[in-house]
Amino acid sequence: MTGSTGILNTAQGRFRVSVQGDPLAPALILSNSLGTTHEMWDPQVAGFAQSYRLIRYDTRGHGGSPVTPGPYRFKDLGRDVLAILDALDIERAAFCGLSMGGHTGLWMGVNAPERLNALIVCNSAAKIGTAQAWQERAEALRQGGAAQMRTLADSAPSRWFGEAFIQQSPQLVKAMQDALAKLDPLGYAACCDALAESDLRDQISRIAAPTLLVAGQWDPVTTVADAQAMQARIPGSTVAVVPASHLSNLEAPEAFERAVLNFLAQA
């Protein structure tokens, strides 16, 4: 098994990318949520890399990937994924994204179906939140800068995790908060712009790839009902509910990994 982390030159810019697993295995690319980096997937690396060539990357505006002037749109974020696959000489891959990353996957399913073997959309929705709320958050970050990022990080646990998990895993929760606080506020705000603008509810019926929709049982941000609404529109899709809140791969890693690997084995 091979593994590397570094900066990858692509047609869309220089992205921080990690690659693990057998180069000849089927490719699986993971896309992070808003306010995280690709390290959010650390609990899944060992399990996924056993069977797949695993690619993780920091979404535009996050971590070591480019912070270009906003606003961003999901066509930008989706084209970033295509550019990363091209730079790695990968024609087709399975895609798994959470929250913002899951919405990027929906865009891919609609607009680049020829590049997908399978699609896993986790803790996401075809329309996430309201345009006004995202616009207000983006404006607060542009005005408040790093101090506002720290404020956002202070309030993040209740949006990300269930109360029991927050009490049981304080070190992980703090590490996620610290990572959020260090992100570039303008990159984060530009991703908020993308979330404010995007509504794929009338387009996802065109998704043809085998699709799994993972929902957190107690997720207050993107609910089980959101997953069920997508299932009603995406032909042949299935829903898996795991005992977690929003960052389900961290709160319920074993159930999450089992749901994804079982689906991929069948897909």
Image (spheres, rainbow, N blue to C red):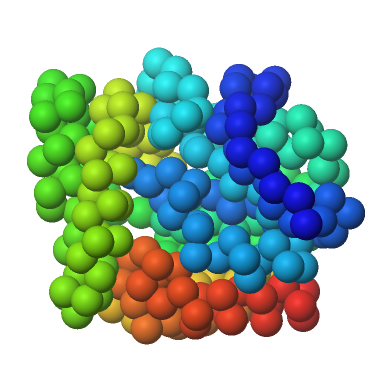
Lateral position of residue 168 relative to residue 56, left or right? left
Identity of the residue drawn at 66% across and 76% down: 261
Query: Is 174 in front, or is 145?
Result: 174
Identity of the residue drawn at 84% across and 50% down: 23
Q: Is residue 242 visible?
A: yes
Locate residue 27, reporting x and y percent. Answer: 77, 54
Locate residue 75, reporting x and y percent. Answer: 56, 34
* Quarter of the figure with the C terminus: bottom right
Locate residue 119, reporting x and y percent. Answer: 66, 62
**Number of residue marks:** 0
Lateral position of residue 100 relative to residue 24, left or right? left
Query: Is 74 in front, or is 202?
Result: 74
Q: Is residue 239 visible?
A: no
Identity of the residue drawn at 34% across and 77% down: 244
- Farthest top residue? 69
Lateral position of residue 207 relative to residue 200, left or right? right
Displayed quadrant of residue 250: bottom left
Locate residue 137, reporting x and y percent. Answer: 19, 37
Picture layout, residue 169 above or below residue 110: below
Identity of the residue drawn at 50% across and 80% down: 254
* Quarter of the figure with the N terminus: bottom right
- Farthest right residue? 24
Displayed quadrant of residue 233: bottom right
